[in-house]
Image (cartoon, rainbow, N blue to C red):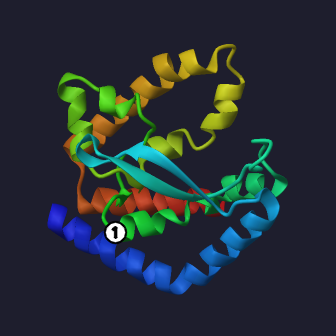
Amino acid sequence: MNLSKRLFDFLLSFLLLFLFGWLILLLVLFSFLDTGKGLFLQTRIGQYGKPFQIFKIRTMHAQTDQISKYGRFLRRSKMDELPQLFNIFVGQMSFVGPRPDILGYYDQLQGEDRKILELKPGLCSWTALKYIDEDALLQLQADPLKYNDEVIFPDKVKMNLDYYYNRSFWEDLKIMWATALRIIH
């Protein structure tokens, strides 16, 4: 499945970058005008625990670290994630897989949970759909970090392990379709 999945990722990301590259550049330009910077790069944990730079459209003002109105729109519509098509194109990510996390989470997994690191991180997943409003959920908590570490992250690990053991091309298509439907809703 890995070679065929990589070929699928490469061809689809190439096609989408060809068709929507102009839109991504336009969104980055608007973000630059809005926030003072166009792109947001952050180190995330990739396949086999290797760090990589993820690309997003910047949604926060460079000086104040406050989310702009334009940034809220980008986040709600998930268009801030479009530059990750480049991460997929170069092979750092896949269309479907566990969402890449910052240092201190997936790279710290132990035992069977480390199987998740065998997967390429993905643009979409069942966990991303379940926690599509994760920021809002965390804002409701008295201790957001504790809630993430004790509730959300362990649930993501469980769901990603389930994906690891049950992944298939058809499952990936179901996840991509469900993601597309959720975003356009």
Tell me the quadrant of the picture where the N terminus can be found.
Answer: bottom left
Q: What residue is shown with label 1?
A: 90
Residue type, mark 1 in image: Val
Residue 139 position by quadrant: top right
Question: Is residue 54 left or right of 109 when viewed as pictured?
Answer: right
- The percent position of residue 158, horizontal first and vertical second, equals 34, 29
Question: Which residue lies at the image location 42% right of the left edge and 83% below the top edge?
Answer: 15
Question: Is residue 108 left or right of 185 when viewed as pictured?
Answer: left
Using a 10 Å C-alpha cutoff, classify the residue at mark 1 as few (fewer than 14 neighbours), some (14 to 19) or many (20 or more): some
Quick one: 146 or 130, which is closer to the camera?
Answer: 146
Is the residue 114 above or below the residue 52 in the image?
above
Question: Is residue 181 left or right of 29 when viewed as pictured?
Answer: left
- The percent position of residue 120, horizontal first and vertical second, equals 29, 52
Tell me the quadrant of the picture where the C terminus can be found.
Answer: bottom right
Quick one: 106 or 96, which is closer to the camera?
Answer: 106
Question: Is residue 8 left or right of 74 when viewed as pictured?
Answer: left
- Residue 99 visible in the displayed image: no
Question: Which residue lies at the image location 74% right of the left edge and 65% below the top edge?
Answer: 32
- The percent position of residue 49, horizontal first and vertical second, equals 27, 40
- Residue 127 visible in the displayed image: yes
